[in-house]
Image: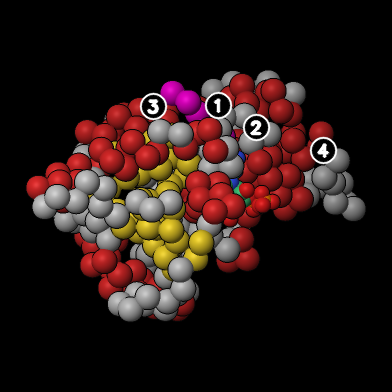
Amino acid sequence: MHIQWYPGHMAKAKRNIREDLKLVDLVIEVVDARCPESSRNPDVDSFAKEKSRILLLNKADLADKKETKRFASYYAKKGFYTMEIDARNKGSLKKLPSLIDEACQPLIEKNLKRGIKTPTIRAMVLGIPNVGKSTFINTYVGKAMAKTGNKPGVTRGNQWINVGKRLQLLDTPGITWPKFEREIVGLNLAMIGSINDQIINIDELVFYLLKYLVRYYPDALTNRYGETVTDDEEAIKVFDAIGKKRGCIKKGGDVDYSKTAKIILDDFRSGRLGNITLEHVPGGIDDEQDQSET
Ligand code: G4P
């Protein structure tokens, strides 16, 4: 199943983002820790080559902690300043101001030489839909959130927000990109709810999810559905068993896969299946395996 989702309004938003990047010192990209690589917009790498980059691995509360650590160090090696967060929880953002200072050190030093002790840092906040970008901004800025309205040079659609005296965030609409190069990216984004569900074949998507879970998280299936799963169990049998257990049966007695699929997907998205990460650090053995199975 090859998924693409890039509605017209996103192309327009992308042009605005590109334009407004000229105004910022720092790019803060919010990604979903359950699939950080899939939920990172590759366009940003080419647009924001010269900028300092912070990568917030959000929804870390839902991801596999071991994998999140691996991703954090992978991105740190690539030059990103990274942090694991749960955007709903202000405590998880406590270290962000010092991370922003670290990421903007060259700017701060340049200003110090000019006699400016505390320069205003301008940061663009980016993220594909549903990664928790709005939640992050609301939690970080809190009640003090002050939208500053239109400023010269800022394209319509993007919005400046003052965070105290030192930081200005430029909020942007959630966008994807024109072509997911790898099939697995579309599948992962569909699973985390970043793609409009209406264009997805949920049964097929969940079949793929089950294959992945049988392989990497069999205990999650056992714990949630009481199905003892062995590594070589066929995903379709698991699908069937869950359907029967949950009473998803059609009139003729067959399993209602669509109904079952919705239950499983909802369980995954809400974290009821436990802490799960959908992909592995690029270049590793597991990553190659994931690619060959889609
Ligand atoms: P967006 O701006 O990037 O599109 O995402 P948004 O903040 O609207 O968040 C999308 C959903 O993800 C929301 O749930 C939000 O509560 C949830 N969320 C955001 N950050 C985190 C996180 O770190 N951990 C977890 N577990 N959930 C997070 P929703 O069900 O769509 O809405 P709501 O009923 O919670 O408001």
Q: Position of residue 265 (x, y in %)?
A: 65, 45
What residue do we see at 54% from left, 38% from top? 90
What residue do we see at 39% from left, 27% from top? 69
List the residue tagged with mark 2: 273
List the residue tagged with mark 4: 246
Who is closer to the viewer here, 182 or 156? 156
| Region in magenta | 62-66
Q: Between tags 3 and 1, which lies in front?
A: 3
List the residue tagged with mark 3: 69
Tell me: residue 64, above or below residue 117. Answer: above
Element assignment for label 2: loop
Element assignment for label 3: helix
Who is closer to the viewer here, 150 or 43? 150
Distance from disc 4 to disc 2, alpha carbons, whole Å, reads 15 Å
How would you rate the neighbour count of disc 1 (Cα within 10 Å): few for under 14, some for 14-19, many for 20 or more? some
Residue 125 in sight = no
State whether label 1 is within 8 Å of ligand 1. no
Distance from disc 3 to disc 1, alpha carbons, whole Å, reads 18 Å
List the residue tagged with mark 1: 217
